[in-house]
Structure formats: C-alpha cells, structure tokens
Image: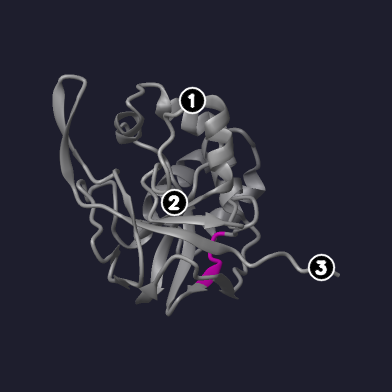
Amino acid sequence: MTLPPIPQVLSVNVGLPREHWWQGRVVRTAIFKEPVSGPVALAGHNLAGDAQADLRVHGGPDKAVYAYAHEHYAYWESVLPAGTLPGPGAFGENLTTQGLLETEVRVGDEFEIGTAVLRAVQPRQPCHKLNLRFDDPRMVPRFVAAGRSGIYFQVRRPGVVQAGDALVLCQPSPFAVTIQDVVDLYYGVRQDAAAVQTLLAIPYLPASLRAHFQQQAR
C-alpha cells in the first residue's frame, strides 16, 4: 500500500498593512504578502513580520494563519489573464502548501508544523480587498464560485515555521466535517440539516460561523 504524501509548506509569506489607491479611495490592507526564507516565529495570532489592517474582520485567534494550496494556482492560471497571477502569497496566504486540501482537512484537525501546532477551524470568506489585490472587481465572486477557499488556523502551540516544513496531522478531529463541507453549506451549494447540526456541535467553531449556521438552522 502506498501512503499518501505528507502535506508540506512550500512558502511562508508575510506582509504589513500598507495604503493602496483603489477605485477612487485609499484602502489600507496587508493582503500583499511576500515569501520569506528561513525560520519564522509564530506567536500569539501572527507570524513575525505579518499583521492585519482591519482586526474587525481579519486576524485574531480564529484567523491567525491562512493557508492556501499550491494546487489551486493551476486553476487560477487557467482562468485569469496570462501573466497576472503572482507567485506564492498571491491570495494573501501566510502558508502556500502542497497536499493540504479543503476536501480532506476536517474542522478541528491539528497539524504540527516546525515546532508549532495549528488547528484548522474555518474556510475563508473573501472581502473586497481580494479585488484590490488582483485589480479586478469580479475577483471576490469568482473566488467564491471556484470553491477554493483556503484554510484558516488557530495557533494551538507557538513555535517556529519555515518553508519545507511538513504539516503532520498530530491530532485528528473527532468531527467528520471538512473545510469544504463548511464552504458548501455556507454558500448553499449543499443543503444538509444534519451536517449543520454536526457543525454547530463543534465547540471551537468560530463565533461568526456559529451565528450564521444557527440562523440557517432556524
């Protein structure tokens, strides 16, 4: 039997808030991330050298680290104009990964990466700053329609991470709900009352998602 390859970090990407001119106004955002080499400290809710501009909707314990699969880049290269897709960090992700897909990662799965431990808790619901990043006012609806959300993580144990680290599943989730399940339920791609109830039973489900699905379950 051939075992599946262990997921890996291809790139660690960070960025600080900067001001950009977009559609007639100044927008402050940290969505522009750049790859960094060598070990990067992960403490609290941020990687060293990384921050968020609007803490009302970004960052915090439930959005401490954002990972996006390198496998999705091939899709975007096929649908975006040639030469417009930047390299790692293009989607504002902190970790560009290989082998870590939304269809396989469950809400609550914990991964050891370097000396840190991360817990997968939710998909991304993109905001208008993704439009700015790609200079395309259609990018948010395209991102949602593509169903390639990426994964937000909580920090369970601070540590040091770097490109090349494996993402080792050290604590499987007891809940059979994948990140892709959350995406499909959130956007109405799938109607499944039982799955929503399972989701609501997860104690560490982020509050914003809990409120959304409680409303949906009424």
Rate crowding at label 2 as few (under 14), some (14 to 19) or many (20 or more) other CA atoms within 10 Å: some
Asked if residue 99 is positioned above or below residue 81 in the image, the reply reads below
Circle 2: residue type = Arg
**Residue 194 seen in render:** yes
How many marks on residues? 3
Q: Which residue is mark 3?
A: 2
Asked if residue 83 is positioned above or below residue 49 in the image, the reply reads above
Which part of the image, by quadrant, shows the N terminus? bottom right
Query: Which one is in front, 184 or 93?
Result: 93
Numbered mark located on residue 177 in the image: none
Report the magenta residues as a range: 107-111
Disc 1 to disc 3, how far (Cα)? 37 Å
Q: What is the magenta segment's predominant secondary structure?
A: loop
Q: Which residue is mark 2?
A: 210
Q: Quadrant of residue 50?
A: bottom left
Rate crowding at label 1 as few (under 14), some (14 to 19) or many (20 or more) other CA atoms within 10 Å: few
Closest to the camera, between mark 3 and mark 2, is 3
Q: Residue at x 27, y 70 (%)?
A: 44
Q: Position of residue 101 (x, y in %)?
A: 60, 52
